[in-house]
Image (cartoon, rainbow, N blue to C red):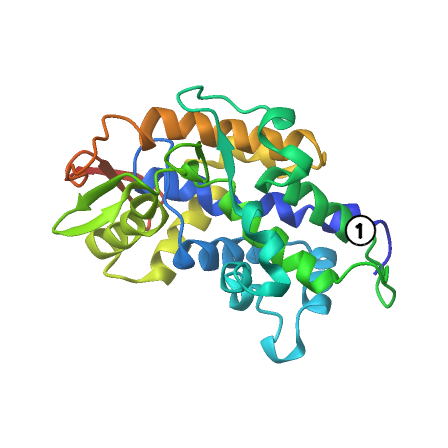
Amino acid sequence: MAGHVGRLLRWSSFAFVMLAGMAAILVPGALGWSKEGHIMTCRIAQNLLGPEAAHAVEHLLPHNLNGDLSALCTWPDQVRHWYKYRWTSSLHFIDTPDEACNFDYSRDCVKDLCVAGAIQNFTSQLLHYREGTTDRRYNLTEALLFLSHFMGDIHQPLHVGFTSDEGGNTIELRWFRHKSNLHHVWDREIILTALKDFYENDMDLLQESIEGNLTDGIWLDDVSSWKDCNDLLSCPNKYAVESINLACKWGYKGVKEGATLAGKLNYNRIDSKYKRMDSSK
């Protein structure tokens, strides 16, 4: 593959493509994140890669995966508590001052240890990629997996949340009939409920609808605002600002300890014709 890998890394901007789609499924401008969310993010991102980027991703993945990036998109969550990778635990989120509802890199990412800093770091490592040669300081396969995962994390609003409640983890409440916490609701519960209610638990159908809305549907006009965002510093910071704003506008809005959250959120289904169909719970 010829040329600078900065071009092939344009795929990393696509890695959050699914977030715009999930926003329309859940509540206006907000989303949940989970194993299912990470897998779908990587699938959609990979489907939108250009030939050079697709070749580079396939080259960095283990051969037994047959080029399927989504097969390892949850790997950073699986290893974060292993001794070897314990240092990555703080890279999945950003703690911001309570009620501040803003993000400041110098204040919130001490020593670059936050998800915005991680995206910058692993993108920088991958910029050293050349087919057939690598910088021996870096494991570029791991860098690819971390980057694809963290691009998902930074777009889950409560991964950029208040310090005292650990991004909603300590706010216990109920989701329908079972106990949960605010962070977990946004990480997974909302996604699974939306899948069940509107897509018969068919992830492929949901993925098809999201991709359609990005390529020729209701979000097409917004694609240009992020697909060419290649700056190592400004882009992750922009994503973090968007997430804390959404966390304050939707994630924390009206939430009380012990409350039943289901029923307070509006859901939108994306039909196969790439239109939004509104419904309320």
253 lies above or below 121: above
Label 1 SS: helix
Give the amino acid type for the residue marked by disc 1 in the picture: Val
Residue at 54% over, 32% down: 240
61 lies above or below 225: below
**Residue 229 visible, this angle:** no
**In which quadrant is the N terminus drawn?**
bottom right
**Residue 116 visible, this angle:** yes
Residue at 79% over, 49% down: 127
Residue 156, position as x, y percentages in the image: 44, 41
Spot the residue most to the left.
177
Residue 8, position as x, y percentages in the image: 74, 51
Please name whichever residue, 238 or 196, is drawn nearer the observer in this view of the structure: 238
The quarter of the picture where residue 268 lies is top left
The quarter of the picture where residue 36 lies is bottom left
Please name whichever residue, 272 or 70, is drawn nearer the observer in this view of the structure: 70
